[in-house]
Every structure is written in structure tokens, then in C-alpha cells.
Amino acid sequence: MARWVLHVDLDQFLAAVEVLRHPELRGRPVVVGGDGDPTKRGVVSTASYEARAHGVHSGLPLRTAARRLPPDAVFLPVDRAAYEQASAEVMDVLRSAGAVVEVLGWDEAFLGVDTGDPEGFARSLAARVRAATRLDCTVGIGENKLQAKIATGFGKPAGVFRLTRANWFEVLGDRPADALWGIGAKTARKLAGLGIHTVRQLASADPGALAAAFGPVTGPWLVMLGRGIGDADVDDSPYLARGHGREETFQHDIADWSRVQAEVSRIARLLAADLAAESRPAARVIVKVRYAPFRTGTRQVTLGSPSSDAAVIERAAAAALGRFTSRRPVRLLGVRAEFAQ
């Protein structure tokens, strides 16, 4: 018996739920996003595999997705309640397997498992999920969360893949640094500026040199990522989101920044009402601005003390918006609260 970390990821989750609700859509390109109208501004939340074959992916503008897809493609609005219910059913199945379950969101979770046959456990788990919910999932197996999370990508769709220190460099060594969970495009560009392009190069980098470039904590942590070293503790505490946000895409660009300010205030008040309902005060307020055509920036303000008071949230949002220097036309605005930990 050995301790393993499994990462369960539901395949094309939102689209899969919609196909279960509308079986006639099976085999057709399905896109979930916005209010389901591809003539309006909005982005793809999830695309079915049939839609992905045409280059449609999460975050793509709906209008672009519509241009790429054939006439039989179907666009559907986001139905949060349906996805929450389906997710809850899946998580109940995972918990019934006798493992420690750490929920990450609607469609994924880590499991801590003691077993001598992790592949067999993973296949049995996926079969139980499918039998109970008719949803497919992929299971990644690792010695820690980092390995398990990355392994899932190699098992899709509806497969099982094991990634450990034994095959880490065989699988990932020559892949770009941003193949690692936790490294985004910005960090990858900075690493490239230091001559570090691959996972293998990152693993062999001098932690001191990266500490000088990224900071005393982040620098050495990046080297550990490159070596496949990560947290192996699976925590079954109830899932709590780290923050809550609201955003709105405008069907016509807003060029008047007095209106931009008014819209941010309005969104901040809506957010404050959400926070009050959740009884979780904000520690930071972040404003997101997406300029026309699609460049996005964020600014944040840390509150003097955690609060969900509408006036406090609104003032903080206004202060964060004031930190944007460009006054170009805006297509999207968002306000997000990060909770005190």
C-alpha cells in the first residue's frame, strides 16, 4: 500500500451537462457561454470536443467561435444552478469511494488514496462517476498534487495517466516551462529572458539566481516545480472560494469614462450585496478593465480592515479604477473581492 494523490477532472463539464439535458445535441459542436447569443459580446465558458476540433476554446469571444464553427453548432447560456447540482452529485460519488476529497471547483477535485493499484482505483472511480451521473472524467495519478494535476492533461479524454518522479523528465523534460501548473505566460516570458525555456532547464536552474529575479520565495519554488516537487496533503475541509466577483461585457464600447466610473460603482454595489449574503468580508478589491478590442488589465486596493459594507467596497473599487492611466474605450468591467484568509 502506498499513498497517492489523484486528480479527478470532469471532461467538457458544462457542455456535457447540457448534452445530458438535451440528448439531441450529442455529436454536435456545443458552446456554453454568456447568454447563449453568439451575436453578442461574451466569451466561451466551455466548448464540447466537437467544437474544440474547430479551434474553439474557453475564453474565446463568442463571435469568433461562431465564425469558426459550422452551421449546426449550438450556443447555450450558462446555467449555474444545473452545473452546481451536477457537481454536487459527482463529489458525493467521490466521497463514497472512501478517499479524502478536496474539492477545487465545479469540475475537479483531489483525492488522497492509500492503494497498491492506483490505476485500478482510478478506473473504478471513473466508472462509478459515469454510472451515477452519466458524466465522464479523467483521473491523473501522482505522488503529489502537482504531478496529479498535470497528469490529468495527458489522460484526457476519459482516461487515466500516472506521472511521478520516475517518469517526470521523460514526459515533461523537453516541454516549455509553462506546461507546469502554476506557471503562466508572463512568468514563462521572464524565465525565457533568463535563458530558461524547458522544464528540464528550470529544474537545473540555480535557486539563488531565480530568487534574485523572482523573489526569495517564488524563485526557489519555481525550481521545485521544475523538479516535480509539490504539496501532497489533501484537505477535505469544505470548499471555500478565495474570492467572489462580478463582471459585465458591454455590447457597445464605453468611451465616456464618467460612465465607466458609474458602471464600476454599480457593479461594486452588486458585489457588496453578494458579500453580505455570504457573510464573508473582503480583504482586497480588484477592478478589471478590458479595453477595446481585447487588452485587459487589473488594479487592486487592500482594505484597512476586512469589510462587506457597500460604501467601503464602492470606494475601494473607485480607487482601484483610478489607478488605470489609460482612458481608452472599454468593453468589459469587473469588480472582485478577495476574502480574508
Image: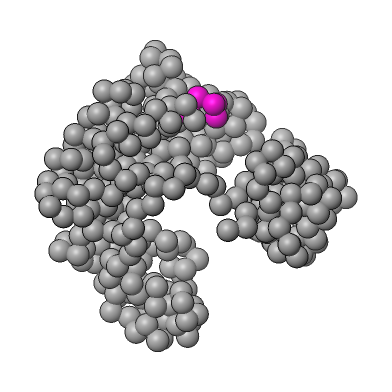
Residue 123 in which image quadrant: top left
| 243 inside magenta stretch | no
Majority secondary structure of magenta residues = helix
- Residue at the image point whose x is 77% and y is 52% from the top: 313
- Residue at the image point whose x is 54% and y is 47% from the top: 241
- Residue at the image point whose x is 16% and y is 48% from the top: 115
The residue closer to the viewer here, 51 or 91, is 91
Q: What stretch of residues is rendered in magenta?
A: 79-83
Q: Is residue 315 above or below residue 245?
A: below
| 81 inside magenta stretch | yes
The residue closer to the viewer here, 98 or 252, is 98
Q: x, y percentage for residue 227? A: 28, 70
Q: Is residue 74 above or below residue 113?
A: above
Please state if 268 lies on the left or on the right of 133 as rendered: right
The residue closer to the viewer here, 305 or 223, is 305
Residue most extreme to the right: 258
Residue 69 in which image quadrant: top left
Please state if 67 lies on the left or on the right of 121 as rendered: right
Q: Specify the quadrant that holds the C terminus.
A: bottom right
- Residue at the image point whose x is 44% and y is 22% from the top: 18
Q: Is residue 77 above or below residue 174?
A: above
